[in-house]
Amino acid sequence: MTGRATVVVVGGGFGGMYAARHLERKLPAGTAEIVLVSPENFMLYTPLLPEAASGTIEPRHVVVPLRRVLRRTRLLIGRATGFDVDRRTVTVAPPEGQERTIAWDRLVLATGSVSRLPGIPGLAEHARGFKTLPEGIYLRNHVLRQLELADASDDMAERAARLTFVVVGAGYAGTELVAELQALTSRAIEAYPGLRPRDVRWVLADVAPMIMPELGRELGRTTLRILRQRGIEVRLETGVKEVGPDWVRLTDGDELATRTFVWTAGVRPQPMVGTIGLPTDDHGRLLVDRYLAVQGRDDVFALGDTAAVPDPANPERASPPTAQHALRQAKACAANVAASLGEGERRRFDYKGLGLLVNLGQFKGVGRVLGVPISGFLGWFVTRSYHLAAMPTWGRRFRVGLDWAVALISPSDIAELGSLGRYDPLARKEPTS
């Protein structure tokens, strides 16, 4: 309608938001219209989701309003439900109202990922996920509710089940989640005279032979030691055989009575990606080149968890699905989209990771920065410093920093957050309280 080229970015996470932000800088005003399609009007800063779930950070402070960051981008709230790459159109379903079809000249796919659910009996029905802000708030409410119900119960078996929390997946999400929520329960237990610290049981299980293999054997052992010193049961080379409404059966033959089972063992691209008709790898990720262009297309680009982006450090493998890689992919992608419209030069994605950082709470952390391993208080301090610097706006940095300062000098807030998060997106049902 305007005669300008239209660039449609699908996905408002790290990859999508930063791609649109860099496009605003690369494309002069009037050159093209930038449209961002996102289910929410915010970007979730996922590395701080565990701290939001534990209550260390106010949940609103780990999200960044897209309209505050993107000044020249047209934001459409809704989900992309269909693509026609030959006609260059995308169908968007808003939360209310009818679907609409948008034409594009360039398409950027940054749709992110969803929890990978293998065919374990009862998993889809009874597991709780941990990828979104509502899921994080829900878990916090749920854990606090279990403490309340356990304190009110005279049935010892029921108390034990309610105070047993099982997390499967010893990667970043699972490890940081169990560390933060265990710290929450250890602080909160002081407010429950009928409960003792040794009554609370946290179990972290994974089929891998070591915890967080991305960190290496030495730091993996350090992480394992820190968690076990805190009383967390870490079960390696142990998977899940079956899940029930109030129990889980592990592959080592042990059956745990629990009302809390959290699944963080792996992700996969949005299923919708496989319906577009573009080439994908065995994991369902779009195949792209070093310029983030989808194979066989010069008008479709993809990044983040959606794409198998060649890793500059190891070209035979895809880049790790981390936020720091998505940020750099977004910058390169924006430059290449702009170049395809005649603005600037193409740019290869050549970023090699600076390191890995994991916050274990209670002034402990582990990581590897420029090849140098760090742990303990230094690991915790560097992890928090990095995330504070990486937050997109000064307003959010100030709010997060203030939350951390308040948490150091005040007791934990153990109030449930009302009706917020009282649903389980992974199980696709409304749980009862």
Image (tube, rainbow, N blue to C red):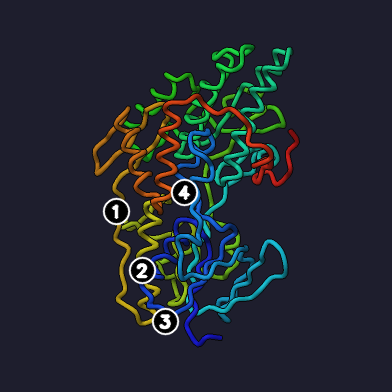
Q: Amino acid at mark 4?
A: Tyr
Residue 31: image tag: 3
Q: Residue at x 71, y 18 (%)?
A: 158
Residue 306: image tag: none
Q: Residue at x 57, y 40 (%)?
A: 136
- Quarter assignment of residue 289: bottom left
Q: CA distance from mark 2 to mark 4?
A: 25 Å
- Compared across the picture, whether 134 is left or right of 328 comes to right
Q: Amino acid at mark 2?
A: Tyr
Q: Amino acid at mark 3?
A: Thr
Q: Mark 2 or mark 4: which is in front?
A: 4
Q: Earlier in the sequence, mark 3 or mark 2?
A: 3
- Asked if one can make out residue 95 in the rendered structure from this viewpoint, the answer is yes
Q: Earlier in the sequence, mark 3 or mark 4?
A: 3
Q: Residue at x 40, y 74 (%)?
A: 337
User: In the rendered image of this protein, does residue 214 appear above or below residue 163?
Assistant: below
The residue that mark 4 highlights is 45
- Compared across the picture, whether 136 is left or right of 30 comes to right
**Badges 1 and 4: C-beta atoms under 8 Å apart?**
no
Q: CA distance from mark 3 to mark 4?
A: 30 Å
Q: CA distance from mark 3 to mark 2?
A: 21 Å
The residue that mark 2 highlights is 291
User: In the rendered image of this protein, does residue 181 appear above or below residue 128?
Assistant: above
Q: Earlier in the sequence, mark 1 or mark 3?
A: 3
Residue 352: image tag: 1
